[in-house]
Image (tube, rainbow, N blue to C red):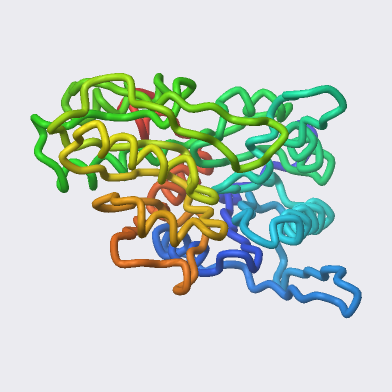
Amino acid sequence: MTGITTQDEKRLVLVSGRAHPQLAIDVADELGIEMVPTTAYDFANGEIYVRFAESVRGADAFVLQAHTGPINKWIMEQLLMVDALKRASVASITAVIPFYGYSRQDKKHRGREPISARLLADMFQTAGADRLMSVDLHAAQTQGFFNGPVDHLWAMPILTDYVRSRVEAGNITVVSPDAGRIRVAEIWAEKLGGGPLAFVHKTRDTSRPNQAVANRVVGDVEGRDCVLVDDLIDTGGTIAEAVKVCLDAGAKSVIVAATHGVLSDPATQRLQECGAREVVVTDTIPIPPEKRFDTLTVLSIAPLIARAIREVFDDGSVTSLFDGNA
């Protein structure tokens, strides 16, 4: 017999960038581990330095970083961490990206535009990532941009469990903010008891970012408790206008539910003034105190991410987290 056989057990390590330290702490707590001690700082010219304070050789490493503002800085920091892990001889590297930066730039709307979501996947592959993990990608086909396994997690179970406790089950209408997300709204409706669907017809000028006009709601919302669902809220223009359209059409109340609370200015003001009964998001992105308001509810995504990390580490089934089947 040639070679050497050992009985060493696998080792899972969690490392985190500086973008969202609280989420990393929460994930580590859910896993029952401590994060790898890490040194990270900026040089005077803006360059980033990272180093891990203990050996990670042979470990299965999970690198968690939220792609929040300043988004390019935090993406670069995560890439450097992936490169450092590769050069430290880890067994595998999973880039855990709760909110995938540039996800809305997943195709060319006009000539001479980049497909930035694809470029980001290529950058992580080049840096040395073996696997990506993200929550509610803007478009599911983004998984195909990375030439390797991609774990696409859904925040829907967390959101639907909460929303179900806030509305009368027999009076729910699930509303999509545009026709393109009807399929997601259908799944929401099924999870919330099979109520009717509606969608907001809107127009968007592709030459003007974050600009959309909600025209009318298609479907029955009069007297109903509407649940307006989307993957993210950026400047809040689309969602705020959709809330107003639903209320103008006779909706009894509107709850907004979204996975990613980007909340770029002036989202906070728009959401406060639009008439929504409650705005529910998860903490895939850190939401500072100055962007929070009375009707905003932030749910923890850490238990979902921790369970997915454990399934990957144990060679289990991430799919089973959502449909109960391996």
State the residue at coordinates (56%, 57%): 264
Q: Residue at x 36, y 36 (%)?
A: 229
State the image coordinates of residue 233 (x, y, percent, origin top left): 48, 47
Query: What residue is shown at x 16% (from left), y 47% (from top)?
Result: 166
Q: Is residue 39 above or below residue 152?
A: below
* Image-based side of 103 in relation to 304, left or right: right
Name the side, left or right, on which 219 lies relative to 78.
left
Where is residue 198 shown, x and y percent of the image? 30, 23
Q: How many marks?
A: 0
Residue positioned most to the right: 45
Residue 64 seen in the figure = no
Q: Specify whether 191 is left or right of 62.
A: left
Residue 285: image location, x then y, percent: 52, 57
Identify the image quadrant of the C terminus. top left
Task: From the viewer's side, name the closer residue of 282 and 263.
Answer: 263
In the rendered image, which quarter contains the N terminus? Answer: top right
Q: Residue 220: tell me if it is visible.
A: yes
| In the image: residue 83, left or right of residue 239 | right
Whole-percent x, y for residue 186 in the image: 32, 21
Residue placed at 58% from the left, 49% from the top?
Answer: 10
The part of the image, by quadrant, that contains residue 256 is top left
Q: Give the quadrant of residue 225.
A: top left
259, above or below 137, in the image: below
Q: Is residue 231 above or below residue 236?
A: above
Instruction: Give the camera-side residue of 186 and 252.
Output: 252
Question: Looking at the picture, does residue 165 appear above or below residue 40?
Answer: above
Q: Nearer the viewer, residue 82 or 54?
A: 82
